[in-house]
Image: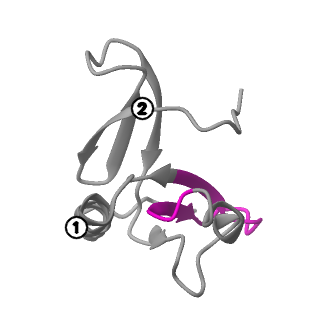
Amino acid sequence: HISYAWRRRWCILRAGLLCFYEDEGLREKKGEVLLDPLARCVAFQAPRAPGDSCKHLSERPFGFAISLDREDGGRPLVYYFDAGEPPLLKRWLLALAQAIRVAPALARD
């Protein structure tokens, strides 16, 4: 099930993996994003932000997107997040860039 509504989530970022949870207690995992070395993390305000980033910019000026290429060459899979304020956006972008840099390369056929 894919939800298109904005919901508050709590995230844990590790090398190559971003997990998000229902609440601060981290009891219910709502999903995860596997960050391979080709993943892109871009602020909505960036000129070439992926997917529907530009549609979210006015409502979520401190949002960012994580774009993942599909193995079948189809349209990239894009996840949208809102950092809420400029310092947090900067921290998220830097942390995600680091997590992507150290992500293990996924084996491709």
The answer to whether the residues at label 1 and label 2 have Cβ atoms under 8 Å apart is no
Instruction: Tell me the element at label 2.
Output: loop
Of the image marks 1 and 2, the number of the one nearer the N terminus: 2
- Quadrant assignment, res 77: bottom right
**At which x and y percent is residue 9?**
42, 32
Residue under label 1, please give it: 98
Q: Find the distance from the CA under tag 1 to the CA under tag 2.
A: 21 Å
- Quadrant assignment, res 98: bottom left
Q: Quadrant of the C terminus?
A: bottom right
Q: Residue at x 57, y 52 (%)?
A: 79
**At which x and y percent is residue 97?**
29, 70
Q: Residue at x 45, y 59 (%)?
A: 107
Query: How is the structure coloured here?
Result: one colour
Q: Residue at x 52, y 77 (%)?
A: 45
Disc 2 marks a residue whose amino acid type is Arg
Q: Nearer the viewer, mark 1 or mark 2?
A: 2
Disc 1 marks a residue whose amino acid type is Gln
Residue under label 2, please give it: 9
Q: Residues within 10 Å of mark 1 (few under 14, many from 20)?
A: some
- Quadrant assignment, res 89: bottom left
User: In the current view of this chain or complex, which residue is farthest to the bottom?
Assistant: 47
Does the rendering let one see residue 108? no
Does the rendering let one see residue 49? yes
**Magenta-colored span:** 60-80
The answer to whether residue 1 is magenta is no
